[in-house]
């Protein structure tokens, strides 16, 4: 996109705006996304340690906030979806939800303003955890042979249909699920951040132009603010969907038939 920007004109945001240089030195591990990921781990740890360190019968505001988030993941995403065996998966679901949510919200926090999940490598790694978890619990519960047979040969299906259905089921369980889980998160965070850049950078460019453009600039900034609130909802929703699907996959692997 930048290649088509005329000299002195508006240079629209592109994928180049997501490839940030190292914050210091030439070390690729000091880029802004990686530093934000480390920051998120510190903030999450400090928050939940502080909120649970001195638990009271009548909770403080901090304790209430921590318990509210934990209770939501434990009950709505663990107990309701997975069922009787949910407690052993709560740490995984809780970690995924809080980590993704925090890094998503960084995209609208002043000075930080970058969602780490807009770099596809992070969603890929996160998707690997539920991918390994649901295959592990399925194999442990049903045995390797029975588990793989249940995936490749769905019960109650005419044998002739297996010619078409078996490759689809194998691809679904071993390729499509982790890819869609990660790419959904990545695409939403990438597109949302790019959209905010368009409105904010566009408004900044318009306000520096001729009088006619200056009059349009406030509309661009206003839309940028509106889209920021919309992006916040999307960020929360994507953290929820990622964790919900992870729980659903685990629940399916625990079922006798899947």
Image: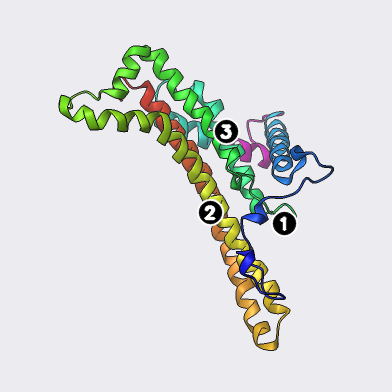
Residue 59 lies within the magenta run = yes
Q: Disc 2 designates what residue?
A: 233
In the image, the segment drawn in magenta is 54-69
Q: Quadrant of residue 162?
A: top left
Residue 159 left/right relative to 73 = left
Residue 21 percent coordinates (x, y): 75, 48
Q: Mark 2 touching mark 3, by CB under 8 A?
A: no
Whichever of callouts 1 and 2 sits on the residue coming sooner in the sequence is 1
Q: Disc 1 designates what residue?
A: 110
Q: Residue at x 62, y 41 (%)?
A: 65
Whichever of callouts 2 and 3 sits on the residue coming sooner in the sequence is 3
**Label 2: element kind:** helix
Q: Residue at x 63, y 30 (%)?
A: 57
In this rendering, the answer to whether 230 lies above or below 49 is below
Mark 2: few, some, or many residues within 10 Å (few <14, many ≥20)? few
Mark 3: few, some, or many residues within 10 Å (few <14, many ≥20)? few
Q: Residue at x 61, y 66 (%)?
A: 198
Give the farthest residue toward the bottom: 211
Residue 5 percent coordinates (x, y): 64, 71
Task: Point out the frontmost of discs 2 and 3.
Answer: 3
The Cα atoms of the two marked residues, 3 and 1, are separated by 27 Å
Whichever of callouts 3 and 1 sits on the residue coming sooner in the sequence is 1
Residue 138 lies within the magenta run = no
Looking at the rendering, in which quadrant would you find the N terminus?
A: bottom right
Residue 189 left/right relative to 31 = left
Q: Disc 3 designates what residue?
A: 125
Identify which residue, 250 or 29, lies in the foreground.
29
Mark 1: few, some, or many residues within 10 Å (few <14, many ≥20)? few
Residue 187 percent coordinates (x, y): 52, 49
């Amino acid at each position: 996109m930048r290649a088509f920007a005329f000299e002195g004109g508006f240079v629209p945001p592109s994928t180049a705006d997501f490839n940030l240089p190292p914050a210091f030195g030439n070390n690729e591990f000091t880029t802004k996304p990686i530093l934000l990921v480390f920051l998120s781990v510190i903030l999450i740890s400090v928050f939940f340690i502080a909120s649970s360190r001195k638990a009271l019968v009548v909770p403080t505001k901090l304790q209430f906030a921590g318990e509210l988030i934990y209770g939501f993941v434990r009950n709505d995403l663990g107990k309701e979806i997975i069922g009787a065996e949910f407690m052993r998966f709560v740490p995984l679901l809780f970690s995924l939800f809080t980590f993704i949510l925090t890094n998503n919200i960084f995209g609208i926090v002043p000075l930080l303003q970058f969602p780490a999940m807009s770099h596809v490598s992070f969603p890929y790694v996160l998707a690997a955890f539920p991918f390994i978890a649901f295959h592990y619990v399925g194999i442990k519960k049903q045995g390797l042979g029975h588990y793989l047979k249940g995936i490749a040969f769905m019960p109650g299906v005419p044998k002739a249909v297996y010619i078409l259905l078996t490759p689809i089921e194998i691809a679904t369980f071993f390729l499509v699920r982790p890819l869609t889980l990660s790419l959904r998160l990545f695409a939403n965070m990438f597109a949302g951040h790019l959209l905010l850049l368009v409105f904010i950078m566009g408004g900044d460019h318009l306000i520096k132009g001729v009088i006619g453009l200056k009059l349009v600039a406030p509309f661009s900034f206003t839309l940028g603010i509106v889209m920021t609130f919309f992006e916040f909802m999307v960020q929360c929703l994507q953290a929820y969907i990622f964790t919900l699907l992870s729980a659903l996959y685990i629940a399916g692997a625990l079922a006798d038939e899947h």
